Amino acid sequence: MILDKNQIHHFNEKALASHQAKWNYYKNEIPNAEAIVQNLAKFNVAIPSWALGTGGTRFGRFSGSGEPASLEDKMEDVGLLHALNGASGAISLHIPWDIPSDYEAIQQKAASLNLKFDAVNSNTFQDQPGQPLSYKFGSLQHVNTAVRQQAIDHNIEVINHGVKLGSKAITVWLSDGSCFPGQLNFRKAFQNTLESLQAIYAALPSDWKLFVEYKAFEPNFYSMTVGDWGQSLLYANKLGPQAYTLVDLGHHLPNANIEQIVSLLLMEGKLAGFHFNDSKYGDDDLTVGSIKPYQLYLIFNELVEGMDARGMDHNHDLGWMIDASHNVKDPLEDLLQSVEAIMLAYAHALLTDRAALNTAQDNNDVVAAQEILQNTFRTDVRTLVAEARLRNGAALQPLQFYRQQQVRQQLIKDRGNSKASGL
């Protein structure tokens, strides 16, 4: 389904007077409101292909209807999101689920939808039909050289697909690890994984990046071979300047100080970017900002401070992507909510009085520092985010438009009860 821009224009007209009154107020009340809106209008968050269908958990999946059944369908869904929020102009593909049959046609479709291809993702965490060797006991860490080579070959194949699409990065997430003490020799597993990653790294084009993702637990519950940011950073440092650590907000133990982690990775020049989601207990893959919106702001506060300190481009120098999985929501509604939460956190970070905060920190004025952060977080910046959408030709209220226009019902009408996508 491809939205008619005139529909969005007519929808916005009904709310334009109210929005304009709010914008006239806030641009006089909020310092640097215009500069914040300009930054918001340039900011984009990539949508992963697997989030467009119902996700679920390892216990079961309750599929919805009208889900995308092909790569073309997935691209149209991302194009729909981008038309509504003006901030979802990239799609991240997962191989082998998203291998194009016609690269030229796919590139033309992406151009027609105003989309780019973000990082491509490999899959060695499950066996594929016809796969000769199993990843039951690991992939890049496996004790069997042939299994490791199979996983290496797959990752190189993913890079080749990405090159044809214009992507510039590959994300490697490993489920490798162990479930019981004694099952695995940690040192050998690390060395096997490093040698495998080195083979993949050697296949990178000169203008590409390799993102090493980490996860504290699941599917292995005794050890994960890339279990935390320190292990990921160790691999990235050993691999070379094109390797970076990717942070997934759910891939931490409860109460981990993620804002400190990203600050240090930025300082070291080794932060790849983000997989955004939220969690209550662990790797819950909940809607971004649904549980810990203040933490999301604190993370963005460190990101903006660290990027500005290094002279980085906010929109292009780090990778921004959502990674969520749900049984109980319409995936497109969830993604609209997630992008909105990210944009609000980014707006708050841009609003933070950096000079005043630095002064409070230098003077050990703990109360003043807390007041600066919390007063910023309590400032309503929704109008600024809406103004950025309006300038991009998107909907002032994307979720309201989606529901009023019965977009899901239209997708079901077009696609039937397709339930083919998602994890």
Image (cartoon, rainbow, N blue to C red):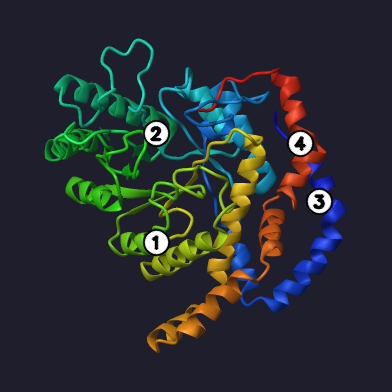
Quadrant of the image occupied by residue 151: top left
The amino acid sitting under disc 1 is Asn
Q: Earlier in the sequence, mark 2 or mark 3?
A: 3
Residue receiving disc 2 = 121
Q: Which residue is mark 1?
A: 257
| Measured Cα–Cα span from mark 3 to mark 4 | 13 Å
Q: Position of residue 104 (x, y in %)?
A: 49, 24
The one nearer the camera, 241 or 282, is 282
Q: Which amino acid, by three-letter code, is at mark 2?
A: Asn
- Closest to the camera, between mark 2 and mark 3, is 2
Q: Earlier in the sequence, mark 1 or mark 4?
A: 4
- Calculate the distance from the C-alpha at mark 1 to the C-alpha at mark 3: 40 Å
Check disc 3 and report the residue beneath it.
12
Q: Quadrant of the N terminus?
A: top right
* Residue 12 seen in the figure: yes
Identity, as a three-letter code, of the amino acid under mark 4: Asp
Front label number (3 vs 4)? 3
